[in-house]
Image: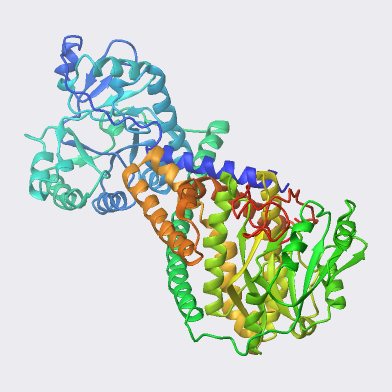
Amino acid sequence: MRYLLPTTFLVALLAMLMLRGYVHSEILADHRVRDADYNTRVPKDVRSGGPVIDARSGDAKTLRIPDRRIVLTFDDGPDPVWTPKVLDKLKEYDAHGVFFVTGNMAARYPDLVERMVAEGHEIGLHTFNHPDLSYQSTGRIDWELSQNQLALAGAAGIRTSLFRPPYSSFSYAMDNKSWPVTEYIGSRGYLTVVNDTDSEDWKRPGVRAIVERATPKDGKGAIILMHDSGGDRSQTVAALDTLLPDLAQRGYTFTRLTTALDAPSAHTPVTGSALWKGKAFVSAVAVSERITGVLVVGLAVVGVLVLARFGLMLLLSFLHARKVRRRNFGWGPPVTRPVSVLVPAYNESACIEATVRSLAAGEHPIEIIVIDDGSTDGTADLVEAMRLPRVRVVRQRNAGKPAALNNGIRHARYDIVVMMDGDTVFEPATVRELVQPFGDPRVGAVAGNAKVGNRDSLIGAWQHIEYVMGFNLDRRMYDVLGCMPTIPGAVGAFRREALDRVGGMSEDTLAEDTDVTMALHRDGWRVVYAENARAWTEAPESVQQLWSQRYRWSYGTMQAIWKHRRAVIERGPSGRFGRVGLPFVSLFMVVAPLLAPLIDVFLLYGLVFGPTGRTVAAWFGVLVVQAVCAAYAFRLDKERMTHLISLPLQQILYRQLMYVVLLQSWITALTGGRLRWQKLRRTGAVEAPGGSSGRRPQGPGAAAGAVDRRPYV
C-alpha cells in the first residue's frame, strides 16, 4: 500500500490537472478562425431565408420568428459573474430567452445551467471548446456535440436539439466551408440557429449602441444575438435594462425559440446511464477545479515559504558566520581535556580502518570506542588487529544503533562524548573544533559540518549541493534561532550530563539523532553548530539506497516531531522549543518539502498548456534565488562552485525523488506502517583531505553519493 497509494495519488493528481486543462480549453482547443469563402454551394433559399436552419430531413429549409416576438440569445456562457446578472434582468422583466452554452463552461458552472432551465429559459449547444467547426473533421464535430450534451446532462439532466456554431452570424453569411457543417449538424438531429439581429455587444460599443442595434425594425420578429460571457459584459446587462422595457412597451414578447415557432420543446430529459455519466463528469470537473484551486493556493504558499526560508537562511547564516568568525570570538575557556569518541559499527569492514586511523591522527586527546553491533564481516577483528593505542572494541549482539551508542556511553571515561558513523573519517582538527563550544556550560550538544566524500557522480553532486546548502546553511540558521533539529550522526558531540538527563539515545524513533536533539532543547540545553568540525562520509551510491535512507530519515523525523508534540503546550524551555522550534521544523522539514514540487508540476503544466513564457520566467526566478543561496553556502564552506552546474537538474529530478519519498513517509505514518533498520553497502572509498586514514588519498570528491548521518538505513 505504501507504494500503491503514492502512485495512485500522483496518477489522480495528473488526471485532475488534465481534466482542468480540458475544461479550460487548454487541451484539444483549436482557436483558429477561418476567413469567409465563396457561397456557390449554399442553397439560395438558405442564404435568403430566416435564422433557423432545419436540415434534419436532408432538404434544408429556414424559419423566421413571427412578428412582435423576440428571441433573446446569449452565447459563450455560463459565466459566474455576468450570467447571474443577465438572468436577474430577464427575471425582473419576466422575459425568457435561449442560452447557447459551451460544454466547458457548463461543466464548470452547472448550477447556472440548472437555474436557466428552472427559470424557463431554453438551452442550446455551442460546442464544448468553441472551435471553428469548418476546420474540424466529422469525428471532432461529433465529439464537440457529445461532450456538450454530456455537460448539459450532468448540469440539468437534459439534452437539447438546438445548436449554434461558434463564430456564426447571419444566414446569408453561410459559405462553402460552413454550409457542409450545417448539413452535417442537421443530419445529427439538430436545428442550427444563427441570428438576424446582432447587438454587437462583444465590441462593447456602449449601452445606447447596443440597444439601437438590438432593436428590430417595423415590428418584425427577431433572434437577437448577445453574450453573457467572454469578457466584461456590463454594457450588455445595462442594455437589457433599457431594451426589455422599451420593446415590451412596443408590444413585443420575449420568448423561447420553440415557443416562438410553436414547436415542441427543444429539451429532452436524460435518464439512466447517460444521466449518471453526465453527473459523474460534472462532479469530476468540480473536484478538479477544487483540487487545482488548492494547488494554486499551495503554490502561492510554497512560493512564500521558499522565499521566506531563503531570506532567513541568507540573513541568519550571515549573522552566524559573522559572529563565529570574529577574531575575539570564543565559546568560553578552551576545551583541552580528553573526550570519548564513539563509533557504532555494523558490518563496516570496508571503511572502519580508515575511520579509526583518521581519529588516531587527530589533534585532540581522545579515547576511541568502537561498538561492534553484532557484525558478521569481521569488523571488530579488523579494529583489534590494528593494535592502535587508545582504541577499544566493545562487542554486543545486534541491537541497533541507539543501543550501540548507549552501550558506548556506559563504557566512556570522559564527560564529553563525540559520536560518528563507521563510514566517516575526521580531519585532524575535527574533534578539537567540535568540542570547543562546550566551553559554554549552557551548551549540551554540538553539530559538526558533515561533508560528502564521494561526490563525483551526478547523484553525489546533487547530494553535495543538498548538504552544503540545505543542511549546513540550515544549521547556521537554526543555531541563531535556537532550534537546531538534528545533530548529524556523522559528526556530533554531547555533554554526558545532558545525555544522562534526557535518558540517552532513545529507540522510540528511527531518527535517534533528531529525537535526542529535540529532547535536549526541551531540557533547556543549547545546541550549536561548529562549522570547522568537518567530517567526510560515504553516501548511498544508487537511487535505491538513497531512497531507503531518505525514507527512514523522513519517517523518523515525523516520529520525533510527534513524540515531542506536547512541548507545544508546556512551559519553560520545553514550551519555548515547542512553540518556536517544532512549528519551524515541521514547516520547513515536513510540510514545505511536500509542497515544493508544485513549482515543477506547474512548470510542466504551463509548458504544455500555457502561459509558457510567464511559467518559465517564474520557475527560473525561483531557480535564481536558489542558486544565490547555494553560491553563498558554497562560499561559506569554501567549496568549489563547479558542482553548482548540476543545480537545475537537481531541482527538476532530485526534488521529485525527495517528494515521493516524503509522500511515502506521510502515508506510512498515516496508515500506521513501520520501518526496520537496514544496512547501506559501503565501499570504503572516502577519506579526509590529508590522507590520515592510511589509504591513498582520493580527496573529498572521490566517488558518488551524499552524506549519510547514520550507518543504518
The image position of residue 471, as x and y in percent, is 57, 64
Looking at the rendered image, the quarter that the C terminus falls into is: bottom right
Residue 258: x and y in percent read 30, 31
Q: Nearer the viewer, residue 649 or 614?
A: 649
Most foreground residue, 558 or 350:
350
* 327 or 494: nearer the viewer: 327
Residue 402, above or below 651? below
Q: Position of residue 311 (x, y in %)?
A: 42, 69
Residue 292 visible at all: no
Q: Give the color scheme: rainbow, by chain, secondary structure or one colour.
A: rainbow
Is residue 174 in view from this perspective? Answer: yes
Question: Which residue lies at the image location 29% right of the left edge and 33% below the top edge?
Answer: 259
Task: Please tell me in which quadrant of the rendered image residue 487 appears.
Answer: bottom right
Name the spot of residue 5 as percent of width and height, x first.
Answer: 67, 47
Q: Is residue 75 above or below residue 571?
A: above
Count of numbered circles in the view = 0
Q: From this view, report whether residue 674 is shown above or below residue 209.
A: below
Q: Is residue 286 above or below residue 519?
A: above
Q: Residue at x 14, y 33 (%)?
A: 197
In percent of the image, x 38 and y 50: which residue is there? 620
Residue in the foreground of this view, choosing between 203 and 149: 203
Q: In the displayed structure, does residue 362 sit left or right of residue 395? A: left
Left/right of residue 135 with respect to residue 603 in the rendered view: left
